[in-house]
Image (cartoon, rainbow, N blue to C red):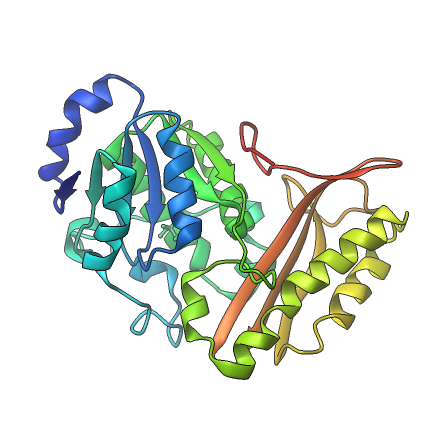
Amino acid sequence: MELLHTRADLARLASLRSGGRLVLVPTMGALHAGHLSLVERAAARGPVVVSIFVNPTQFAPGEDFARYPRDLERDLELLRPLGPAAVFAPQVSEMYPGPDGTAVEPGPRAAVLCGARRPGHFRGVATVVVKLLNLVGPAVAVFGRKDAQQCLVLDEVVRDLALPVRLVDAPTLREPDGLAMSSRNRYLEGDDRRRAACLSRALQAARRELEAGERAVAALEDLLALHLADADVVEYAEVRRVPDLDRPERAEGRLLLAIAARVGPARLIDNLVLEVGPREVRAAALLEGGQP
Ligand code: PAF
């Protein structure tokens, strides 16, 4: 496993890149089992490069950029047994060589849900991911479905900018009580940790309601909100259409059930992606080539 820090170091990937099979797993570090499962899935497709970079431009002023957990040594220890070809862990100056440089403005999928509450967030994500794709040159990049809107925004960026890469989304890993794995779960202690499980319980309750035949979007959103009483603040609990993230008239077809809520010091997001037919409801992927 090569440890690369600079753009110049990335030249060491030249032979793997020219084979056209490189797979990138972009992360911000503070790795957990969810990230490791992405690396395992990526490894089934080709030699893997994991990037570890806490990207300043996707945090708004007042968000948790400064306290975001960073522990490169531990991350490397967790990755070593999985045998990625390389880890790319650049400094901020390597990714942002100019003071106020060029940025990627994402399209309409970035305007709703988290995009409406975190101004500039997806611009920062799109900018850094396009840089990572250009620097590493993978054939495939694997993203966690927990960040569902991120996957769909990046899918639109890749399509609109005609980037030569295929994006794949991989399933969310969960704790035994249903809490979606996230680096930000480290902020949760005691009662906050217990209460955080309400997000996944709300999603499961909505799924059961869909399975029982409910197709009214407002009724499903009310049910989500009802099950989020344990959260301190509910930012949104919505049903959206995949892939455009528009509001559907009825809960039919490929849907994203998405929640963002604050519990104690943590802002948590969670979602379910479902294919809703006239009679059946099943788990689905967000992107073509993703596994449900
Ligand atoms: O999902 C993340 O960890 C980040 O948003 C990403 C994709 C690595 C970009 O900084």
Q: Quadrant of the C terminus?
A: top right
Q: Residue at x 81, y 58 (%)?
A: 220
Tell me if residue 171 comes above or below residue 205 in the rendering.
above
Looking at the picture, how far across and down is residue 107, in whole percent?
A: 52, 44
Q: Nearer the viewer, residue 263 or 55?
A: 263
Horizontally, residue 67 falls left or right of residue 287, namely: left
Q: Is residue 208 left or right of residue 20?
A: right
Q: Is residue 99 visible?
A: no
Residue 46 % position (x, y)? 33, 25
Q: Quadrant of residue 254?
A: top right
Where is residue 170? Give x, y as percent.
50, 40
The answer to whether 94 appears left or right of 267 in the picture is left
- Asked where in the image residue 232 lies, by quadrant, the reply is bottom right
Q: Position of residue 1 (x, y in %)?
A: 17, 38
195 over 119 or under it: above or below: below
In this picture, is 92 found above or below 145?
below
Q: Most extreme residue toward the top, as rendered?
A: 19
